[in-house]
Amino acid sequence: MKIRRLQSLLLGLPLAIVLAGCIDDQFGPPSPREIPIGTPLTIFQLRQLCPPGNVHTFKGDTSVFAVVTMDDKSGNIYKEAYIGDATGGVVVRLKSPGGLYQGDSMYINLNGISIKYYRKLFQIDSVDVDRNIKKISTLKPTTPKTVTIPELNTFDYESQLIRLENVQFVKSDTSKTWADAEHQEYGELTLMDNMGNAVMVRTSGYAKFASEKVPRGQGSLIAIAGRYDDKVQLIIRRTSEVNFDNPWWDPFDGLTKITIAQLKQKYTGGFPTIHDPNYIEAVVVADDESGNYYKNLVIQDETTGIDLKIDAKDLYKQFPVGARIKVRVKDLILGAYGGLVQLGGSVYQSGGFDRLGGIEEGAIPAYIQLVSLGNEIEPTPIGLVGINDQNLGKLIVLNGVQFDNSELGKPWAENSATTNRTLTDCDGHQIVVRTSNFADFHEELLPEGNGTMIAILSKYLTTYQLYVRNLDDVDLTGERCTLVEPFFVENFTSNLGQFKEYSITGAQKWQWQSYDSGCAYISGFQGGNKENEDWLVSPAIDLEDKVDVRMNIREAINFITSYSDLKVMVSNNYDGVSQPTESGTWVELTGFNRPPGNGWTFVDSGNIDLSQYDGQNIYVAFKYTSSTSGAATWEVGKVVLSGLSLK
Amino acid sequence: MGYKKKIVLPIIAVFFSSICAFGQVDTTVVTVDEDFIPVISLSASDFESDDEAFDISGLLQGSNDVFTSTAGYTFGACRFRIRGYDGENTTMMINGTPVNDPETGKVIYSTWGGLNDAMRNTVNTIGLAATENTFGTLGGTSSIITRASQFSPGTRITYSAANRNYRHRAMFIHSTGLKDDAWALTISGSRRWAQEGYVEGTFYEAYAYFISLERKFSDNHSFGFTVFGSPMRSGRSGIAVQEAYDLTGDPYYNPNWGYQNGKIRNSRVNNYHKPMMQLSHYGTFGKTDITTSVVYSFGRGGNTALNWYDAPDPRPDYYRYLPSYWENDDEYWYQYYTDQWKNNKQFRQLDWDHFYFANTKNIFSQRVGDETITGNRSKYIVEERRNDHNQWIFNSTARHRVDDRIMLTGGVNLSHFKGFQFKEMVDLLGGDWWVDVDQFAERDFSDENLYQNDLKNPNRLIQEGDRFGYDFTANINHYEGFAQSEFSLQKVDFFIAANLSYTSFWRTGHMQNGRFPNNSYGDSEKHNFLNYGIKGGATYKISGRQYIDLNAGYITRAPYFRNAYISARVRDDVIKGLSSENIFAGDVSYIVRSPKVKSRLTFYYSEFINQTWNRSFYHESYRTFINYIMTGVNTRNLGVEFGAEANITPDLSVNAVGAWGHYTYNSRPSVTLSRDNSAEMLAENQTVYFKNYLIGGFPQAAASIGFRYNAPKYWFVGANANYFGKISIDINPDRRTETAVGGMVTTDEQLPLLLGQQKLPDGYTVDVFGGKSWRVGSNQYIRLNLSISNLLNNKNLTVIAFEQLRYQSNDIDRFPPKYAYMYGTNFFLNLNFSF
């Protein structure tokens, strides 16, 4: 019996334990909680509480009631939602993505939450959907407000749902996708209306529709009016809200193309608006990236170049160097500044004068279309001597140039103002390099070597000027050339100067005339061709310490019979006092640039090599002969001898 | 056949087997949980599911080979694997019928968890040795004998107390023995439970039942019927990064649980019940024994997990919630998170109350067909990833003794298996419904159809108990035959065996997935494989007490369903070049069996050629969830194992075992990366520079010495000192590719961090055990046993260590390795009464 009892005890004990040892794994729902409302505020009141630039953090229960106008389901915004009430709209920055959906009517308890501005966009920061928000109902529609682009730009509709009508993407954007889905980068596209007003549509590379092509056409669009600093950025919710069913309006329809040279010919003075149905197509050769140009592009076609003034900053982002653009010149304005013809979009008053203003930023799409990028133009090689108005506005390249000795050690521009610096070639020809004190390189010291410079050729009144785009265009690192310096100069400013005239035969003589700011003049014509031989002889020119001597003259010739009647001579053994026909051996100089002989234009000779006379004493003479069968007119404007000094 | 097989009958060594029983159920329960997207339960490592324990430990506990039995229960604590083999390399049988899981090839011990008394009778073979019932594989076989006639009559009731996964166990077994030479019945049952196990937040609730009936018609015919099952639910522990352990000061920190209404609730609950029944006929026809069985098994498996929609990651150890995410970046948040982690327990656990709060106010309007339904859409839910199955097996084996020298064995095995994998809604946590869409696809695609999980039921509202997400059947048919001849000569025993098998599997989709509308629904193409294996062995008897034993085999193995599909959840596509795996293995042993000393020394060598490795994870570079499929993975396992047991006196025995292995990757596998959300191939034929890396995550070397003293007065005491070493981290293949090191120069300081393989510290443990028995009546005994493991409380031994698959090549510490540590000091107390 005892054993039986023990048995039942031992059997029963585990059984009891089994039954007793219940595992508690039943879980009832926690008691419900509510999110308090406290004081309700409208979005307008929120903005009043926190003026631009401020931060306001709520203490205590305050709530804002609103309807979600845009959620993050499309991926176009992330950790954000736009909400709106009757008084306005605001963006809500969420602590984690998702959880709020378009049409949710809800309130946000603002206790502990800050309202503030990011890039001037007003926002409710760090909202926890689970902890701060109570949804009341769903699918509440918000009707978008129909606005115009200029109305949007007042920022009165910030963070609100808006609708634009009769808008289209600018031509260069019509072939794009909404964003760069592959690299997950934002797409920034420009929307324009038929007035040329423009606004940006910004789309995230994470948006589900990022890789879809934008619609080509014109129509209506619903979007949230976002903001970044002083720019409106439209954010679309879904592509089905972009209905561009009407044909795309081409601002270039019916226009014919002309060249820049033809455009410049239209300019006759003042500030005329162009009415001809024309456009030009050109490549940007200088933009505003370095700051040396401001609100200004320089464009160039196969004929020449021109300044295109646009009233906008950061033009290089849209129209960088190499951008081929079409510019509708119809309705634009031509003007001149210091004689330089420019193309702009408006006229304004400054200091009592009319000035040419740029094309308004909003109107860019109506006037300028980007054709393609990356069409770099080769600069035109040119010497300082060959510079002329044909090359104005063109990208040129100068070889063998250096900054003048007097400029060395200085920056490109002084901090206070746009600054001119002098550039010379090894022959001493000079030109002005003009640099803005807003150019990002203006504080850099001028390079001290000799070499190559690429620049835009410009002109102010009669002075040619160069504008450097950036320092990549400047390669002045070679060895400087020692300047060949003039040591004998005769400009015939008011008389024959240092020269003496010898009339060998005939009545006509070398005399002074005022042409070309003064010149030596002779003509054998006096009521008919006369027989003459006349010499114009320099004083003794000492080449003792000179090397590499060359002579430059400037002359004009008309009614020529033969160049042998107009000889430029040199002698190293003339006595200086006798008739030149009686003393010295005269050698004729040839092979230099001479005028055609039938006009009054003065022509520079270029270098006439006299280096064989280095170290000697020489005389230069101009020998004129005429006969009854022919008498030319010969004008010599300048005689300069230059060379390296040994001293 | 000597030592190779022996039926360990219940009569012998009651004490011994009680001790052994400790090892079976108490391996560290941990789970590998990549910290990425929650819906998919694929893991970085093959010890993924704690409950379907794939360890070697339980299998060989009853072996009378000292090495094998020690490896079974002493080394099991550190996840030691004999010869480095995975679970699919051992064959488990019930009364001679193989029952490995056809989907993975692994042995699922939980099927008979808690039935220690009923499942005690085993027949074990080691390595490639000849087996009575099957061809087997290279890691040995184990057959549990559940014939009622084999149990000695009697009753035993047991109560156990422990501080491991469970704290209590109650168990009974009753056997009638063979009554009237006709009937025998054994019944057994148990309950194991704990409100909280060794690890915080884990509960354990398991029952088990077992009935075995045998009817003997004659000495030549007998029918047996066995049914058993082990329904169990348990809360899982998690694996975290070292930072979390350091911050909490708890090497067993468990991120899986949190408070609900002040009560601890675990989000990851295992819930298994897979009963098995077997009808067997044991017949003798002259010199031939034929055993024929029909097995049917079915049941449910599942583990729960949180899922969430449009809400922040609720897991407290998500990498962005760790201080390291902010370190050197934002001092304020770094300090804030450090402080919260250290001092605020609620912060570092789940917040169930918040899940309810968020769910009950998330009013949402969902369009379903033409209707719009408004309700609270759950943001957080508990879902269960189900892995149910049913399987029919027909198995018949015959053994024919030709004469004293020759034994012929042959058999056939037919198996039809259907695995049902789907997700089920367990708890909406206060919300009204969940919408059956793929939220990651929803993020990527505008077209609503593309993110439907089930195009036939678009935008379906899911209630508790509904299936959702994915739903498919894995159909696996396997037919196999084998033949074996064993020869016994005076000096030499030898055998040869061969098998031939045909495997056919296909997928049946029950949902038409939006991303894969044309290859997700219905039956997929069938994939068929013809495989064979040959093996042979010889034992040379140097003397009656010394043997030389030699075995070798070559096996081809059809790919497992789990590895074959790019993404079986959602589509039919299999990996490119799906082909069989080839295995070569051989071993040579020197064995001593004398009355005083038993010992074995074995060298082994094996090569696995053309394995497949298939995981899904979030890839930092592609910024998407990918399927990462590595083919042509070769591994080589070689090493030496030694075991010796000596009886110094009749009362005192000492034992020593040691194992040293060298397990390495032996090829440069090729990798295909495909997007999970579309058919897009992200990369093909990338080379993984895997050769010569160590296979990591478990000790490749281990040793133990111990003694046992059996006192005449029915008490005993013993102790073991154990060593574990040569542990290295389980490596992430993607870090060993040209893409990963691309952009780094050879002198980059980050290069060794990216490519190196971390060595983990070696460790020592000491286990002690003792017991006493009292005779309280005729044939009535009370026995008390106590076992204390890890007496020195060593908490530095890693039992799991792996590199996360998600990584950032220029900031390796962003997703650092994850570790799990061996339990500190723990005990198991056993009190039983038998009569």
Image: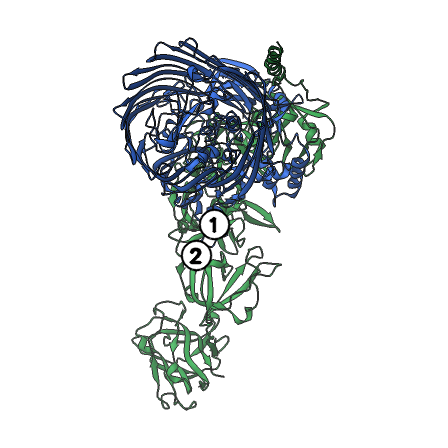
On screen, A331 above or below B578? below
Quadrant placement of the N terminus of chain A: top right
Q: Quadrant of residue A415?
A: bottom right
**Tag on residue B63?**
none
Report the number of numbered marks: 2
Helix, strand or loop for disc 2: strand
Report the residue marked by disc 2.
A395
Residue at left 61%, top 44%?
Answer: B329
Q: Badge 1 local density, few (<14 within 10 Å), some, or many (20+)? A: some
Which chain gets the green colouring?
A
Q: Chain of mark 1?
A: B
Helix, strand or loop for disc 1: helix
Residue at left 43%, top 40%?
Answer: B642
User: Which residue is at the front of the view, A166 or B175?
Assistant: B175
Q: Badge 2 local density, few (<14 within 10 Å), some, or many (20+)? A: many
User: Which residue is at the front of the view, B545 or B409?
Assistant: B545
Which chain gets the blue colouring?
B
Give x and y (percent) for residue B28.
54, 31
Q: Are marks 1 and 2 in contact (CB under 8 Å)?
A: no
Q: Chain of mark 2?
A: A
Question: Residue lying farthest right?
Answer: A60
User: Which residue is at the front of the view, B372 or A176?
Assistant: B372
* Mark 1 vs mark 2: in front: 1
Give x and y (percent) for residue A290.
52, 53
Q: Quadrant of residue A48?
A: top right
- Say left or right for B432 vs B530: right
- Say left or right for B202 vs B446: right
* Residue kind at label 1, given as amino acid type: Leu
On screen, B3 above or below B740? above
Report the residue marked by disc 1.
B751
